[in-house]
Amino acid sequence: MNNDNTQKPPFIWEGANVYFLLTDRFYNGNPSNDINFNRTKTPGKLRGFEGGDIIGIMKKIDEGYFDELGINAIWFTPIVEQIHDGVDEGTGLTYGYHGYWARDWTALDPNFGTKNDLALLVKKAHEKGIRIILDGVINHTGPVTPEDPIWPEDWVRTGIVCDYKSFENTTMCTLVDNLPDVRTESTKEVELPTFLIEKWKKEDRYEKESTSLDEFFKRTNYPRTPKYYIIKWLTDYILEFGIDAYRADTVKHTEENVWIDFRKECDYAFETWKKHHPLQVLDQNPFYTIAEVYGYEISSGQEYDFGDRKVNYFEKGFNNMINFEFKLDAQNDYEFIFSKYSDKLQNELKGFSVLNYVSSHDDSPFDADRKRAFESGTKLLLSPGISQVYYGDESGRSLAIEGTEGDATFRSFMNWEEIESNPETQRILLHWQKLGQFRRNHPAVGAGIHKMISDKPYIFSRVYNKENHKDEVIIGLDLGTGYKELPVDSVFKDGTKLKDAFSGKETEVQNGKAIIDSEFGLVLLEKI
């Protein structure tokens, strides 16, 4: 494949630009699904359903919002049916708006939408070359409430809260009180919970679900233990909708072998879907998996340390781990971050990748008061590894909402009004869009090898060369406005026509240099 700009670059997961959003907090595409299951109690601040849904995400795909941001994969919080009631966690009543409190893995929560909505979302995303990453929970069910019965004793444990001091007391325990922990280590066969059988009968799908389970257990020869039911239910979404990846939640809270089996069934489901939908296959990328091992840092290489033992989750079925260190590394200068990440990913993590972020739904961000939105975008989007744009990073959405408790402050509704009307928000957004599009168009940015060309002014190259695709770019940061000379002879020969993707200016290499005269201090050079 040549490097002509008329040809789309191949999609390479290691260089992807992922957008992560809370389904309920992004965009309300269908107000008629805002209240279900009599969820009408007054919740704590930002702890109830706010109306965002799958149709809302789809509308923004249609509008080209993600294209303009250079996004080529969207990860959204789980959409399976949540507990019907809410619980008081000391912060006022909380409903399962975040998606991590499953009640029925085989159904979608009507607050988020229908399976038809999901099918259409995947289709529309794929038509634009955007991959879909679902979020899957195997570790726990939703809390117990008067409306939401506890799963049977042979399915879940309660009463032992994790203290994180050992492998066992990180896996065989509940994350918090009243979050029943699935007995993923159990080898004992279990029956379906009575409440689920009754529910399916009422919904007229008991026969269909039972038959499907029988076929799964017959094909795989797995015992009917809790983890295999849930693995089956989660991988059905791949089989039915052709989703491209899973972000697995609370990975370190189950035994690692759960994930080997999960990966095996993901691969089977993806290959089966491709076989049945040959015209919809985007490329030959295998199914992709991302692990949330809370606290994992790129500096520790392939292993996570529990204190009494270490586990390599890359060997247990994961292509990628969320990197909880990036928001700390982002306090350093560009070269520190870029060379460290290139070195780690090209050496001890070769063949794998990490997901970098500056803010998320769970923990303290790099720039809590949103004073460094331009710097955040530059550091995140130009770093080796996969970039995770958390909804509102690109628009300076506030992460400090008055009256909220705990993580709710990171989860306000997307600030669409500011994007419409605030010039400063629009400036921030434009910066993230230009960098994001450059990353999407050039696998070298996230998946290539980093080399510093000059320290002051700061100029570097990224080169990606494998799988019959070569991609080379040169980037300059903090160059000042006006006339700029960049030494490019390490990558581009004299006579090569180049474009600065940030300003749109074009130039031709002469005497090993590219000259750009622009109002920006940032230059993104690509071959024309």
Image: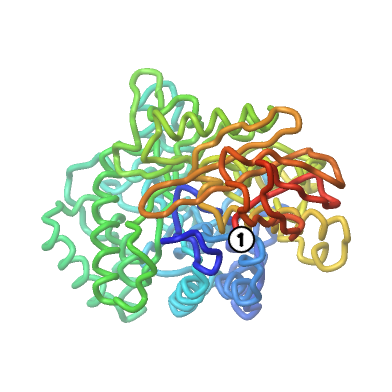
* Residue 73, position as x, y percentages in the image: 51, 59
Give the answer, above or below, for where 24 lies relative to 490. below
Say left or right for 34 vs 3. Answer: right
Visible in this render: residue 381?
yes
Name the kind of residue labelled 1 in the image: Ile
* Residue 278, position as x, y percentages in the image: 29, 76
* Residue 487, position as x, y percentages in the image: 68, 38
Q: Residue at x 39, y 53 (%)?
A: 150
Pick the quarter of the image with the N terminus: bottom left
Crowdedness near tag 1: few (<14), some (14–19) or many (≥20) residues, C-alpha within 10 Å = some
Image quarter of residue 454? top right
Q: Residue 119 versus residue 387: which sits nearer the camera? A: 387
Report how many numbered discs are placed on residues in the image.
1
What residue would you read off at disc 1?
528
Q: Residue at x 71, y 41 (%)?
A: 486
Give the answer, above or below, for where 122 lies relative to 253. below
Q: Residue 306 versus residue 70: which sits nearer the camera? A: 70
Visible in this render: residue 90?
no
Q: Residue 490 versus residue 401: which sits nearer the camera? A: 490
What colour scheme governs how the chains and residues are painted in the rendered image of this protein? Answer: rainbow
* Residue 70, position as x, y percentages in the image: 61, 60
Q: Residue at x 55, y 64 (%)?
A: 5
Q: Residue at x 51, y 42 (%)?
A: 385
Say left or right for 365 vs 87. Answer: right
